[in-house]
Amino acid sequence: MVFVISAPSGTGKTTLVKRVLEELPNLQFSVSYTTRLPRSNEHDGEDYHFVSPVVFQKMVERGDFLEWAEVLGNRYGTAKVDVNSLASRGVDLILDIDTQGAKKVKVKVDQAVLIYILPPSMKVLRDRIVNRGLDSLEMIEFRLSSARKDIEEAHRYQYVILNEEVENAVEKLKAIIVAERCRRDKDFILEEKQRIWEENHGKNYGRGLSEDGREPV
Ligand code: 5GP
């Protein structure tokens, strides 16, 4: 399965995703490619693969991306992944991508689950972006107006989580992933249980029928 998580920048999405990756088994983070420069706390290959615009363009032309988009003046892309081979190892993928990318993934990947993280208010979002101290005033205003537009896309997502309080939001995100996994595994569990039941007790045990299918005498 692919869990797609979007939120306006400054919503605290990265923290939520990190927590869920630590606390739930069999989840893998999809490291995107970007032409943006690394921030001081970011590591190449961990947070992003940081590449030049020329390299990114080559990857676009080669068809290396499942999706890519331009966000706030930089390009970001998700490398094509073999979702089936991950699934055969029982691993699900988390994509932290914007709303444009989410739309494309929803069309291309059957088992994509879209989750949108909302900030409690625009005021809180503004304060968080300012307190991060990473952006110029101009960039802060740009991020806020992009956030407004971005939030209008939230109704397309299957889930929306309000990130008022981190612990509560982490629990909700984990609950969604666990529930979606249960839904996916439903048929497999039922078939497996049926098989074991029949192996142990015969095909008609418990159905009021004898082994040959006739009513018991
Ligand atoms: P930031 O520069 O703050 O790390 O990310 C800016 C935005 O780009 C975020 O909304 C993030 O989710 C989005 N983003 C990161 N990687 C990708 C990607 O591979 N594809 C798309 N479409 N968006 C991405």
Image (cartoon, rainbow, N blue to C red):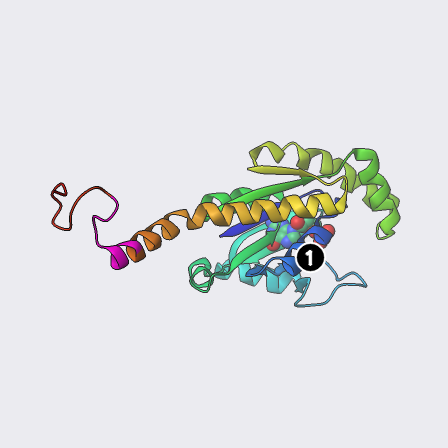
Quarter of the rendering containing residue 114:
top right
Q: Position of residue 186 (x, y in %)?
A: 41, 47
The residue positioned 55% from the left and 63% from the top of the image is 58
Q: Number of callouts in the render?
A: 1
Q: Is residue 183 visible?
A: yes
Magenta span covers which residues? 197-206
Q: Position of residue 19 (x, y in %)?
A: 69, 56
Label 1 residue SS: helix
Q: Position of residue 64 (x, y in %)?
A: 50, 61
Q: Nearer the viewer, residue 97 or 85?
A: 85
Left or right: 111, with 68 as reference point? left
Residue holding disc 1:
18
Q: Is residue 9 visible?
A: no
Quarter of the rendering containing residue 99:
top right
Q: Nearer the viewer, residue 196 or 214?
A: 214
The image shows residue 189, relative to residue 154, as above or below, that is: below
The residue positioned 61% from the left and 65% from the top of the image is 55
- Tell me the kind of residue under disc 1: Lys
The residue positioned 65% from the left and 54% from the top of the image is 20
Q: Position of residue 213 (x, y in %)?
A: 13, 45
Tell me, yes or no, whether the highlighted magenta stretch contains residue 201: yes
Q: Quick one: quadrant of the C terminus?
A: top left
How packed is label 1: few (under 14 Cα within 10 Å), some, or many (20 or more)?
A: few
Q: Nearer the viewer, residue 111 or 142?
A: 111
Tell me, yes or no, whether the highlighted magenta stretch contains residue 15: no
The residue positioned 52% from the left and 52% from the top of the image is 2
Left or right: 42, with 95 as reference point? right
